[in-house]
Amino acid sequence: MKHKKVVAIIGLGYVGLPLALLAKQKGYEVIGIDKDSQKVKKINSGISPIYDKKLIMQVKNHSIYATTKFSELVNADIIVICVPTPVKGKTPDLNPVKNASIQIAKHLKKGQLVLLESTVNPGVCEEIVIPILEKQSKLICGKDFHFAHCPERINPGDTKWHVGNIPRVVGGYSVKCLSLAYKFYSSIIDAPIKKMESVKEAESVKIVENCFRDVNIAFVNELAQSFSKLGIDVVNVIQGAATKPFAFMPHFPSRGVGGHCIPVDPYYLIFYAKKHGFKHKLLKEVRRINSQMPHYTVDRTYEALNEAKVINGSPPKIAVLGLSYKKNIDDTRESPSYEIIKLLKQKGAEVRIYDPYVKDKNNAKNLSEAIDNADAVIVATAHSKFRKITPQTLKKAGVKILVDGENAFDKKAFSSLGILYKGIGR
Ligand SMILES: NC(=O)c1ccc[n+]([C@@H]2O[C@H](COP(=O)([O-])OP(=O)(O)OC[C@H]3O[C@@H](n4cnc5c(N)ncnc54)[C@H](O)[C@@H]3O)[C@@H](O)[C@H]2O)c1
């Protein structure tokens, strides 16, 4: 690189922080901007605000400069927006994207390239973000500044696929915008980058990917509920079907989906399509099926408590293991574990919780404290540490029931030692 270009990353979370570190490693000057001053302080002291082995090492070794001040954008050549896109109930909440855009617009300069990586429904860039940038700055997109959308696909906790090697798609506001964005991503990412014909197409790609996951998971979650009534092990069936080398992609049932993407993004498309006169009946049903899986998990638990004749007047003692939405990470956003805990408490159970990755004031000190003398253990998140639980571990702790929320355990091994095993569809 002839001279060091400056990249400003707005939002230093699960998406923005790895991207900032990658850009720094690839030789860019990096400014990280986040509204959370505690996060900024930590990063500037070389401490990762996210519990992830790789990030912890990287933040320590490749110091990146973080700030809460958007005024520092004057020094940037490229600005990347990585702020959250949550929902309020079932409605998209674009306030973080709007607020970040307003702040950028105040400092926008001619020649800068603005990129949005946050997941948004088609239309957000051209109908919301670009108008905000143009109005406040009095600059014209495609002429005075450049804009493109490159949705992030990072999969936290994945050791194979990371920000540096996941293929990307990019859509530009103009041909020049697209080529500038392509050049930037090619300089940091070691994977194919597909040029889309428009920003809207790029926005749609990401939403489609996550709706696809939601739909497929809902299908197997429904099968799980049907097959457990039929006395058929759904996991064995899916593994059998997966031997077909074409036209089948295995997905597995569980206690529900979580995280900032799958339970959230479909609502962005449902909302936008409705505004334009189309009702996504399938996606709505899919959301309904997946969001009721914690109820199913609690029903399975009570089925087992009744079968084991544990319900005898005093509240059953139930340990819920795992609070994050998926294994080996600390992200609890939209995690089904909290719904399971809430439902168990509503039923009057005495609930203990434990997750070695998550800070929670109610966390048990360790696994033994959580499971000792519990009537039932629900493994809600199958962290690698929990997968080491054996039938003997439970037997020794006096546990009678294992509810396997992610179908991660050997059903026969537990049953043969007298532990009542209930999986999700097995
Ligand atoms: N987490 C994932 O696995 C993942 C994967 C792919 C895409 N995405 C998408 O990427 C986007 C970011 O997700 P995330 O998981 O990194 O979120 P996050 O909550 O981990 O991080 C977002 C950061 O943005 C900061 N922020 C919020 N509003 C701000 C503002 N106005 N100005 C400055 N900083 C602001 C927050 O303080 C936070 O640190 C979302 O659209 C999400 O859907 C997430």
Image (spheres, rainbow, N blue to C red):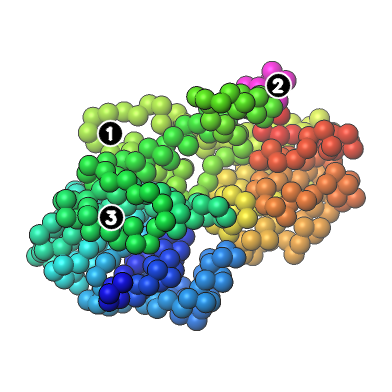
68 lies above or below 352 = below
Give the amino acid at mark 2: Ile
Q: Earlier in the sequence, mark 1 or mark 3?
A: 3
Say what secondary structure mark 3 lies in.
helix
Kindly identify which residue carries mark 3.
182
Whole-number angstrom distance, CA of label 2 to CA of label 3: 49 Å
* Label number found at residue 232: 2
Callout 2 touching callout 1 (CB < 8 Å): no
Give the amino acid at mark 1: Lys
Kindly identify which residue carries mark 1.
274
Viewer can see residue 291:
yes
For this orientation, the residue located farthest to the bottom is 45
x, y percent for residue 35: 37, 70
Asked whether, in this view, residue 280 is left or right of residue 14, the answer is left
Q: Nearer the viewer, mark 2 or mark 3?
A: 3
User: For residue 182: magenta?
Assistant: no
Asked whether, in this view, residue 386 is left or right of residue 113, the answer is right
